[in-house]
Amino acid sequence: MEQIQIIDAKNHVGETVKIGAWVANKRSSGKISFLQLRDGTAYFQAVVVKSEVSEEVFHLAKELTQETSIIVTGEIREDTRSKFGYELGVKEIEVIGESHDYPITPKEHGVDFLMDHRHLWLRSSQQHAIMLIRNEVIRATYEFFNNNGFVKIDPPILTGSAPEGTSDLFETNYFDQKAYLSQSGQLYMEAAAMALGKVFSFGPTFRAEKSKTRRHLIEFWMIEPEMAFMHQEDSLEVQEQYVAYLVQSVLDNCDYALDVLGRDKEVLKNYTKLPFPRISYDDAIELLKKNNFDDIEWGDDFGSPHETFIANSFDRPVFILNYPKAIKPFYMKPHPTREDVVICADLIAPEGYGEIIGGSERATDYDYLLEQIREAGLNEEEYSWYLDLRKYGTVPHSGFGLGLERTITFISGIDHVREAIPFPRLLNRIYP
């Protein structure tokens, strides 16, 4: 008798099989017990009919507790009433590991409580679906960049310099020298692009900002491509192609997970239509002013309500172009005809999910970049290697960073970015 996984049930209709699973939930109706089973690949229902099993098996089924692990034997059959489409007619049950007083019961729990029990919350059907989508986004990311001639490079996690200043970095002592947990791998990726042309990194980044908002994390994963001989407009095309590719890959390969989450697939399909709309920072400010946003002036960064309104003015993700120089990092290329803005763009996701990409063309003039480093109060000696890139064969180059968890939150249609991380770094102590 073959032991299978739930996801493969469609290939074994009419066969008697074994499945190793956990009891996610159960209900009884007289002479029938319904077990909601999960095995890591999917969820489906097992039906225990009193007249079809021994008295011992039926009694055991009624006594099973939430998250008890079992080996269940039965016949796979079609079930047109369920989204999954298949169920198991139970013949035998073997208890492997009992579970008592499982803390996450089938009722409403707050996000704080659930994050404190993240090691168990992952077992829920919704979290399972989100992790399947996360896995697909990661798989599709490698596929996209590999198919487009990019080389993966791994920048250091401990760094001696910061791309965007040190105010929100975790500082550590590195053999009597200051070092920081990586805020971004971008500067290193610029060096890699000068060697390999088109590169990308995929790794953890950190922000020393205490926040429990639905959009922000202390630790998250970032995908950071960098491209030599590429101006900003070409980079924007790569960015929109990449996001559309991720959305389409989830549509193609995560049908079950999207159904579990109740995500509207027609809405997602619209987010694959290219090109994405573009609006300048200047026009975005004007749009907000015309719609009675009196809490923002030219030169301010956008808050969540502003980004949401701008995004909702379009039917797809939207690029906001050319922000004021004063609110952006030192490395961005200055605008050729204006001193007050830089050549950059943020990609704002619809439905209130906020910025998912930040990118720019990079400054290539040595003297300009040195001046910006000094004005930012940074130690120019620590950036000498970065300045070298402008001394030895500099070229136009552009890049961007996409936040993995916020993108997963957007594609999945979930409420909180913390649901998109597998585990907080310090479980039950502090969480992003």
Image (cartoon, helix red, strand yellow):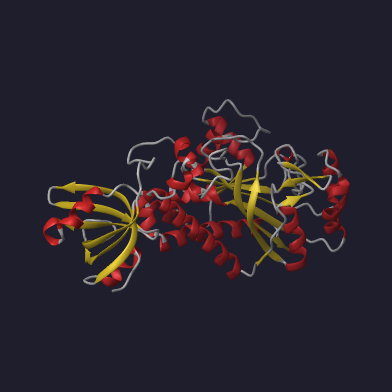
The one of 74 and 114 positioned closer to us in this rendering: 74
Most distant residue in the top direction? 294
- Horizontal side of 47 relative to 309 (left or right) equals left
Most distant residue in the left direction? 51
- 207 to 232, vertically: above or below: above
- 61 to 338, vertically: above or below: below
The answer to whether one can see residue 302 in this image is yes
The one of 260 and 116 positioned closer to us in this rendering: 116
Residue 180: x and y in percent read 74, 45
Most distant residue in the front direction? 56
- Horizontal side of 194 relative to 414 (left or right) equals right
Using the rendered view, name the quadrant where residue 83 is placed: bottom left
Residue 103: x and y in percent read 39, 40
Q: Residue at x 42, y 56 (%)?
A: 269
The one of 287 and 376 positioned closer to us in this rendering: 376
Where does the N terminus fall, quadrant-wise?
bottom left
Residue 344: x and y in percent read 68, 48
Q: Residue at x 26, y 60 (%)?
A: 93
The answer to whether one can see residue 87 in this image is no
- 287 to 30, vertically: above or below: above
Most distant residue in the bottom direction? 1
Where does the C terminus fall, quadrant-wise?
top right
Q: How many marks?
A: 0
Residue 294: x and y in percent read 57, 25
- Horizontal side of 266 relative to 411 (left or right) equals left
The one of 239 and 69 positioned closer to us in this rendering: 69
Q: Residue at x 72, y 58 (%)?
A: 189
